[in-house]
Amino acid sequence: MLKNEELKTFVERVMQMRSVQKEFFRTRNYSLMQQSKALEKEVDDRASKLIVQLKEIEQTELNAKQPMLFGDHITNG
């Protein structure tokens, strides 16, 4: 299940990444570029995982809303 702490951490990391990117473009410092690329990869990886979690939650909620048409079991007949 997706937790608020995960979203908070993700948003904080995105803000950190943007800050480093802005500083890099201001200074063109090579180490900031490396740091920026590392943060971008981390943000991309986390975003991919969060998307998967959100899709799972969405599917679980959709399944919970749909009534079983034929009960919990299938009968042979």
Image (cartoon, grey):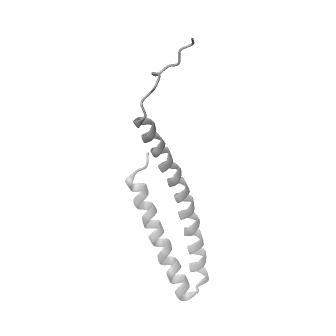
Residue 57 to residue 11: above or below? above
Q: Where is residue 39 drawn, in percent x and y?
A: 55, 68
Q: Quadrant of residue 37?
A: bottom right
Residue 56 to residue 45: above or below? above
Observer-nearest residue: 45 or 67?
Answer: 67
Residue 60 to residue 34: above or below? above
Q: Residue furthest bottom?
A: 27
| Residue drawn at 53 percent across, 50 percent down | 52
Q: Where is residue 73 drawn, in percent x and y?
A: 50, 19
Q: Residue furthest top?
A: 77
Q: Where is residue 60 drawn, in percent x and y?
A: 45, 40
| Residue drawn at 56 percent across, 74 percent down | 36
Q: Quadrant of the C terminus?
A: top right
Count the labels in the image: 0
Q: Quadrant of the N terminus?
A: top left
Q: Where is residue 16 drawn, in percent x and y?
A: 46, 72
| Residue drawn at 61 percent across, 82 percent down | 30
Observer-nearest residue: 56 or 63?
Answer: 63
| Residue drawn at 51 percent across, 77 percent down | 20
Residue 9 to residue 76: above or below? below
